[in-house]
Amino acid sequence: MPTEPPEAGKGLPPPVFATRDPALPEFWSERFSHRFTPWDRAGVPQHLLQFVAATGTPLATLIPGCGAGHEVAFLAEAGWPVCAIDFSPAAVAAAHAALGKWAALVVQADFFSFTPPMPLQMIYERAFLCALPRATWPRIVGRYAELLPAGALLAGFFFFDGGLRGPPFGADPAALAALLEPSFVLRDDQPVADSVAAFAGRERWQVWQRR
Ligand SMILES: C[S@@+](CC[C@H](N)C(=O)[O-])C[C@H]1O[C@@H](n2cnc3c(N)ncnc32)[C@H](O)[C@@H]1O
């Protein structure tokens, strides 16, 4: 998920981005406005399709940092209560444009201050944790833990990489486990075969259960 333009000479002239801080909504809005979204899956990942098919009961789910929100319509069509947020107005506009009758499920909000409209049974993670600097991860994980009651799930895609620059900011497996394990137990951990190029070979589907 490079959020900086490709090197000159490798394709179209790159857009010039003025924003550099992924902790601000302007950073993401600028990239959505330029349609520079290399993280965008443009569909629903296979592991989520399989997980929903295998889960008998719909789970009330929050999608933080939902971007274009491809998973929102899928979960809603499957009968899952879903609420998705993004703090970038341009991301929310992209989701609203794509989601038709499900558009109202996406609201503009900051994950750190948002209160979901329903008790949660799951948080779906994709390219949200890795979008933000590692220094913010304890706060993100703390908020996950606050929002999820015992037994609820944190399920989705986790990006593993040691590179210093980002986004995306990759995790070290042991460091991620050390962050999550005080509040969560790892229930599933699988390789991913249908990643976008930016994550290929470096992301895993994981399901963590709130202690
Ligand atoms: C890399 S994009 C991923 C979008 C989407 N999850 C996907 O898989 O395509 C990260 C998204 O997180 C959003 N974001 C970052 N920090 C946020 C925050 N504090 N609250 C809500 N959204 C946030 C950004 O605006 C951006 O749309």
Image (cartoon, helix red, strand yellow):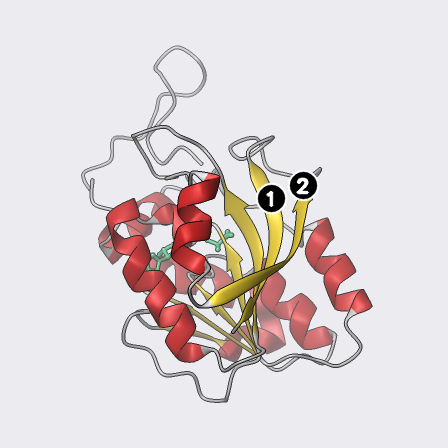
Residue placed under numbered mark 1 in the picture: 204
Residue placed under numbered mark 2 in the picture: 192
Residue 78 point in image, percent of width and height: 74, 75
> Is residue 125 or residue 92 the one in the foreground?
125
Q: Compared with residue 148, is residue 43 higher up or lower down, i.e. above or below?
A: above
Q: Compared with residue 113, is residue 88 higher up or lower down, i.e. above or below?
A: above
What residue is at 58 percent from the left and 56 percent from the top? 156
Q: Quadrant where the N terminus lies?
A: top left
Query: Dividing the image into four equal quarters, which quarter contains ligand 1?
Result: bottom left
Label 1 neighbourhood size at 10 Å, few (<14), some (14-19), many (20+)?
many
Confirm whether residue 88 shows in the render.
no
What residue is at 55 percent from the left and 33 percent from the top? 202
* Mark 2 residue element: loop
Inter-mark Cα distance, 2 to 1: 5 Å
Confirm whether residue 204 shows in the render.
yes
Residue 104 point in image, percent of width and height: 50, 79
Residue type (three-letter) at the residue carrying disc 2? Val
> Is residue 10 or residue 53 the one in the foreground?
53
Residue 109 point in image, percent of width and height: 33, 72
Image marks 2 and 1: residues in contact by CB distance under 8 Å: yes
What residue is at 39 percent from the left and 22 percent from the top? 6
**Count of number-bearing discs:** 2
Q: Compared with residue 19, is residue 74 higher up or lower down, i.e. above or below?
A: below
